Amino acid sequence: MVVKKHLLVDGANILHAWPELRALLRTERTAAQVRLVGELAPIHDGEGVRVTVVFDGSGAELEITCPGGQQTFAVVRTPKGMTADDFIERWVGRTEAAETCWVATGDVGEGRTVAALGAQWISPEDLSSWAGRAGRGVTAQLASSKRNNDRQWGAPKTKSR
């Protein structure tokens, strides 16, 4: 049985921890959230990791959206009265394979809690590094696919001057 990773991200915590997102957050909260989700997409798409980004919500019900149309990449907004931390702790506590969960947060208390439940705790800095590596990997895969397609379909060579 192949055990896959599940990355759970404390969205607000990471938004405040990453300098470029913190700056954007001051003026455009929604844009900062969208950018965070976009930065994490290569972890899902390139490495096959299930990704759940959790934000504190204010609605009456739990809201789940799947930006790419796949259930393995989700954005969750908690209902009023439930924090992102609450959601993440409950998820990790109820899963049969807590060791496959990786929780990204800079909140030391939250990190210790999920670690005690069996999950891996990673810092915002480690998440940023992971997202960067995954992004470079996806870019390299696309370049390789383009070269292979060009060879297969006999794309005309550009002339150098």
Image (cartoon, helix red, strand yellow):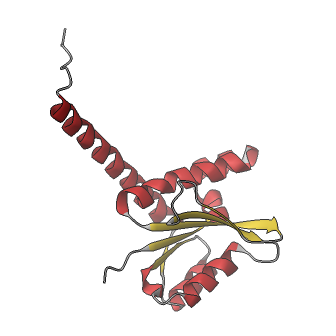
Determine whether, in the image, residue 153 is placed left or right of residue 68: left
Determine whether, in the image, residue 150 is placed left or right of residue 111: left
Determine whether, in the image, residue 32 is placed left or right of residue 138: right
Residue closest to the eye, 147 or 135:
147
Q: Is residue 63 above or below residue 159?
A: below
Determine whether, in the image, residue 88 is placed left or right of residue 145: right
Residue 112 appears in the figure: no
Residue closest to the eye, 65 or 136:
65
Residue occupying image coordinates x 60% and y 62%: 14
- Residue furthest to the front in view is 153
**Quarter of the figure with residue 150:** top left
Residue 121 appears in the figure: yes
- Residue furthest to the top in view is 161
Residue closest to the eye, 127 or 95:
95
Spot occupied by residue 129 in the image (x, y as percentages of width and height): 42, 58
Spot occupied by residue 39 in the image (x, y as percentages of width and height): 51, 52
